[in-house]
Image (tube, rainbow, N blue to C red):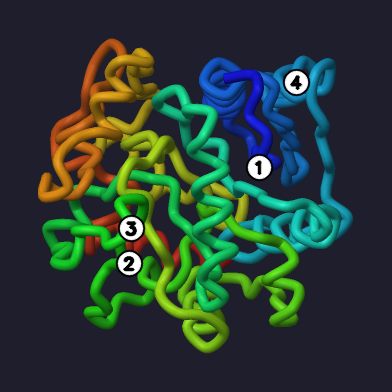
Amino acid sequence: MSDIEIQPVFCIFSFNRAQFLDNCVRSITDCIPGARIIVFDDDSDDAETRMVLDRIREHHEVVLPEAHGEHKHGGLYWNMQAAFESLEDEALVCFLQDDCQVVRPVLKEEFEILYQTLKNHPDLGFIHPCFIRGIDQKKCPVHDANSKDGVTYFREDWGQSAGVHYSDLFLTLPGRLRAHNWRFFTSEPENDRQARDAFGRMAYMRSPFAMWLPEVPAYRGKRKTLALRLAERSQQCGFYPFDVWSRQETVNFINRPDDSRPPVAEECLECRERTPRRPWSYNPLRGKRFLKLLHSIEQAIR
């Protein structure tokens, strides 16, 4: 795997989640030896996270923000813009976040194939590297999962606010975004609309290699409201890293029949020690109306 010729630059966006950031970086280095990794940290003030950043800095690049945001997502999109502008001459980039993990080895030809897929389709802006979330599959089922090229597939547009044309986790050609004067807005729905206008639908990898961890503690505007803390306790949020597949498991996954079911995370992945209840959740406040209201009130007061 060390002889991969086309390999993306991996950009990881982090804030105050030391254990998750460490796991994300280690998963890339373990599964994709020799990968170039750049961590864009949103000015973490947690002592443990700063220690992890210092350790990462010994082998990889760490970039601190030039702009600070009090938006719901902190300075995430400012950092994504900074990453894009600093890497716009690279052949291929992959954007991940600290609550993600690479779950399998990436074979040496895979990135070359993904690169050529992007090059051969001028209207393709992004390729999503993650499995389908069970909660999304339940709400908006994938109907056109059978891929024509054996590498990617596309989700039907059911009017979702994001995920059809754009996701914050992606592979892309920076030069293509530059040619369309791309600039990151401060929400996934806004960026999805921008991607819809500039490109076609986002391609999903038929054989993804990364995934969000389930039930991850969250921040809103770099803060935790009382409601968010209560929601995280109710949801049993914590650190649930995934088992990493062997090379043979990876080969079997890639070579599965073309008419197989789409790659839903809950059906394909297992957590290392304990697995939260399925379907997995990625927003502690999801489905908790009272806590959502309490959360909004506290944010408004602040």
Q: Which residue is mark 1?
A: 8
Q: Amino acid at mark 1?
A: Pro
Whichever of callouts 1 and 2 sits on the residue coming sooner in the sequence is: 1
Disc 2 designates what residue? 293
User: Horizontal and vertical percent for residue 176?
Assistant: 68, 70
Q: CA distance from mark 2 to mark 4?
A: 39 Å
Q: Which residue is mark 4?
A: 56
Badge 1 or badge 3: first in the primary sequence: 1
Q: At label 2, which amino acid type do we have?
A: Leu
On-image quarter of the C terminus: bottom right
Residue in view at x 57 percent, y 26 percent: 28
Q: CA distance from mark 1 to mark 2?
A: 41 Å
Q: Is residue 250 left or right of residue 110?
A: left
Q: On screen, 280 above or below 133?
A: above
Q: Is residue 284 visible?
A: no
**Looking at the image, is mark 1 or mark 4 nearer the viewer?**
1
